[in-house]
Amino acid sequence: MEMNEKMDALLRQVQRPARYVGGEYNQIVKDKTEVDVRVAFCFPDTYEIGMSNLGLKILYGIMNAMPGVWCERVFAPWGDITDAMRREGIPLWALESGDPLSDFDVIAVSIGYEMAYTTVLDMLDRGGIPLRAADRPELRHLVMAGGGCMCNIEPMAEFFDLCFLGEGEDVDREVLELYQKAKAEGWDKPRFLRQAAQIPGVYIPSLYDIAYNADGTIAAITARDGAPEKVRKRIVEDFDGCYYPTRPVVPSTEIVHDRVSLEVFRGCIRGCRFCQAGHTNRPVRSRRPETLLRLGKETLENTGYQELNLSSLSTSDYRDLGVLCDGLLDYCRPRGISLSLPSLRADNFSMDIMQRVQQVRKSGLTFAPEAGTQRLRDVINKNVTEEDLLNSCRIAFEGGWNNVKLYFMLGLPTETDEDVLGIAELAKKVFWTWKQHAVNKSRGVRITVSTSEFIPKPHTPFQWEGQISRAEYMRRVGLLTDALAKAKSVTYNWHDAEMSLVEAALARGDRRMGAVIERVWRAGGRLESWSEYFDLDRWLEAFPACGLDMDFYATRERPVEELQPWEHMDCAVSRKHLERERRRAYEGVTTPDCRAGCAGCGAASLLKEGVCRG
């Protein structure tokens, strides 16, 4: 049976064949005879997740705008097709051409979360690409990676030839231009990698040697062959003028975020001490309202979407939010297009704006107090008070809302049982606020409390903290469950502790962990951010089998003076600032947001003027 016939037969057996066939509106197809470099853009999750990712849409557009470059999309197959692919000898293919990964010059991988690591290996193997960089000696089949996990990609270092630290709009293009030159002039792979290491924001793992102490900690990180001692992240300084995909691929099947996502600004003015994105995405850079209006209208017209979402780490912090919403509503309202605002903060919640943007469709409200008491909110520098939250809920209930979601973390540094019980008390106060101020009590109220386990992440003030054990996390879950058992109209959900343990180990892992990841993959690990596929036992077996201890990475509190695996990754927020913020956390002292006063984190050094305006 021919390959195309095999694929057709295979797709007739799966639940969602549209995931695998391409042919969507606005997809980009080029003539292979006019292409110098073919790029397979691999997203290590399902089509529905990947096609919701704005970063993928941006880089897909940028790479395809380059002369001689054709970028195609590749997503991880779901379980209903994987075994049959192996059995029939069908390799993983790209959507635009249907060609296997082995036909491509460059395999570009976007990794936003650690639980995708095993899926990356699975995709490479299914596409006929050797896993380890050392086993790919030729310039062809270059595997490069970008995304949020690059701030500590050491656990995957031996699998990648090249990594991008920071934002990819400029550095992706620069590396591909160098690759075009290298391919045309017949360079070997070592020469290309040495040259690529000179591009700011490019990390070549093979050009760094890691030495370890007898206790397993890192003794030294040494750059060689001209590679920089530290790789400094790249940003797009002129965010208002940078590329935005106004003609993105429109999926032929339903995806998770089936709408236009309009990125209003990058970075965050807040300094939440647990938040990796809030630190690694600094400094803040915004788009002007008139730019956003133009981009939003163009994208809606080019896609036919009926929903527009304003995205950022904290959308309500956008200075011109009211002006922007009014302009968009003038266009959206008569066309029945809804406008949504996620990432709201309880300390600057505006009922006026919410009532305006939700005229087409009214959704629930979500707030993230993160901690149940003011003491602990000060420790984590949340800068949100109980009064802020209850006042925002009052405004919402008076405006007709009756659905509120509250997000918290358990296991934050210095957390006590009193802090855990404070979550229940806060939820009860939200209920009484509804009781006193709701305009439509006959509809009732839904208050959803959700908790996840705190995970210490690199490049944050809490990067040295240990994660609490699974048993302790479940004890605190039980404590909160009992406290909420009789709470009226309150539903409690909690995130699985087992996956959080693995994520914590991977987040702060070093290069030796690559053997663990590969062993878990060979035991069947893939798509592990999905509960259907995650199996803690695979990880518990793999760590000792590879001579490593999971608790050494996840639950161990680390001395501040210890050399961390990511010390050569410079995200522009200084170590001095992180240490200072950790001290202030234990003192219970808050740090104002960037607009109230510069905290001296160091991120402004990435800007030409050297001043971050928040």
Image: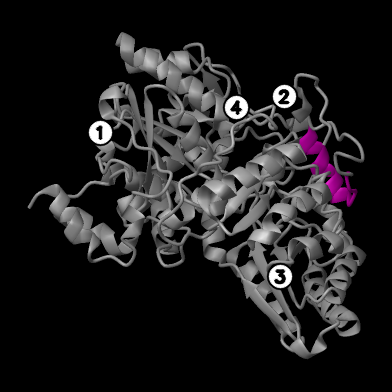
Q: In the rendered structure, find residue 362 and report the number of the disc placed on it.
A: 3
**On screen, residue 568 above or below 152:** above
What residue is disc 2 on?
606
Q: In the rendered structure, find residue 118 and report the number of the disc placed on it.
A: none
The residue at the point 90 percent across, 68 percent down is 391
What residue is disc 1 on?
103
Residue 585 part of the magenta segment: yes
Viewer can see residue 77? no
| Mark 2 or mark 3, whichever is nearer to me | 3
**On screen, residue 559 above or below 575:** below
Q: In the image, is 369 to the left or to the right of 122?
A: right
Viewer can see residue 423? yes
The residue closer to the viewer here, 355 or 554, is 355
Occupied quadrant, residue 591: top right
Residue 283 part of the magenta segment: no
The three-letter amino acid code for the residue at tag 2 is Leu
| Mark 1 or mark 2, whichever is nearer to me | 1
Q: In the image, is 179 to the left or to the right of 236?
A: left
Q: Secondary structure at mark 3?
A: loop
Question: Nearer the N terminus, badge 2 or badge 4?
Answer: 4
Question: Nearer the N terminus, badge 1 or badge 4?
Answer: 1
Within-10-Å neighbours for mark 1: few <14, some 14–19, many 20+: some
* Residue situated furthest top in the rendering: 185
Question: Nearer the N terminus, badge 4 or badge 3?
Answer: 3
